[in-house]
Amino acid sequence: MDGRMKNISEAFIVKSSSITISKDKVGAGNFADVFKGVLRQRKGDREVAVKIVRLVGGNIGSDFDWLTEMSNEALIMSLHSHRGIIEFFGVSTDKIPMILMEYCVGGSLDIHLQRFKEHILTAERIRYLYEISNAMRYLERKQCVHRDLATRNVLISSDGFLRICDFGLSRCPRVVPPKDSGSSQIPIRWMAPETLTRNPLYSTKSDIWSFGVVIYEIFTCGQKPWPDKPVKWIATKIRKGITPELPKRMPRLIREVVNICFKSDPSERPTFKQVNGRMRLIQEMRFPSPDPRLLTLSKLKGVKPTLPPEELDPESICIELEGKEDERSIAISYAAGNSIMTSVMPAKRSVEKGKEEAKAIPEYCFKIFKLFFQKVYAS
């Protein structure tokens, strides 16, 4: 590993003698293979996924790049903890370099989409979008840019919740970024126009573009954009602002989210905070999360989906202040086409007070929204 690994807390340093690695390969990335393993701890044995760097030998430059990317991933994962982020258990460096992570028995989301195809209900697909946007909202708040958001990098845990993984290309203000090398395989199909230049500009807004592609994947049953086209052709199209044709099965509410995620100007794209709030409203009003037993996730061996914990986060609905004189008024800016996110906030209040008071009004707000959505989007 490179010298930056010394910045990882000692609590995350694991001796290789505590790890048993099976022959079962459960995944492979640009520079590493992932095997199923067991981590022996005082509290008992824990099933883990073990990422082992794939050293090519004879090519010192490439090997160093892979080790640097792996170090970057370990550092970033050690700093973040969220239900929607793959859990990090530590690194082992005394023999071969290894990262120890949560083992997600359900595999990757792209494979699940390709396997179950049309059997996945629209409400279940929107549940995926809510969970992914919720995790990305957390990273946005931490100023962490993922740079490789795609359904192949979303895993399904044993409790049926999605976990974002693969932070090798990510950037975080608390971690000194490694020098970008030419060894990394660039995920062209998921990249925003501003990242396909001589001086690429990565930000949360480029992650938002990638999220638009994730929505496309989820509603095309795991299909990549332009699957039969060469990457140079794809890069040219993206630079010109041309995006893949959206499937007819995609609901209008979701289609509108995709379109604004694909704005050529990054400043015109929404934040994950806004998108996550929008997904929650769509769930509440039009596509409530199905009974866990009806989810295709429940058909996966070792996966037992549960209902998400009740979340009462006023920030997920209180996004913008509309400045109405009536402090009880609720401005539905989406109805006027002014914003990606419906605004709910007592006017003439500070944000802090608004957050406190919002805790008392979600039920009232949702009744208003329900009537609005039923009227406008009644099928």
Image (tube, grey):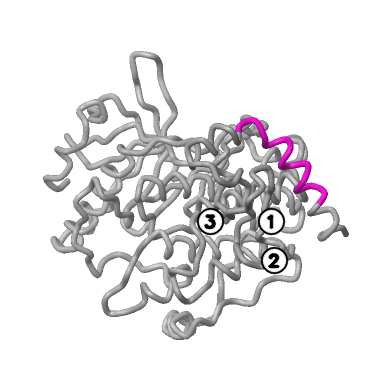
Question: Badge 2 is on which residue?
Answer: 336
- The residue under the point 30% across, 64% down is 184
Does the CB distance between marks 1 and 2 fall below 8 Å? yes
Q: Distance from label 3 to label 2 (Cα)?
A: 33 Å
The magenta segment = 359-371
- The residue under the point 41% across, 38% down is 49
Q: Is residue 173 above or below residue 231?
A: above
Q: Is residue 358 left or right of residue 46?
A: right
Question: Badge 1 is on which residue?
Answer: 332
SS type, badge 1:
loop
Question: Badge 3 is on which residue?
Answer: 151
Three-letter code for the amino acid on which mark 2 is drawn: Ala
Three-letter code for the amino acid on which mark 1 is drawn: Ile
Three-letter code for the amino acid on which mark 3 is drawn: Thr
Magenta stretch: includes residue 208 = no
* Label 1 packing within 10 angstroms: few (<14), some (14-19), many (20+): some
Q: Distance from label 1 to label 2 (Cα)?
A: 7 Å
In this view, which residue lies farthest toward the front?
Answer: 325
Dot 1 or dot 3, earlier in sequence: 3
* Label 3 packing within 10 angstroms: few (<14), some (14-19), many (20+): many
Q: Is residue 198 left or right of residue 155?
A: left
Q: Which numbered mark, 1 or 3, is in the foreground of this view?
A: 1
Q: Position of residue 224 (x, y in %)?
A: 56, 68
Q: Position of residue 112 (x, y in %)?
A: 62, 51
Q: Position of residue 243 (x, y in %)?
A: 56, 77
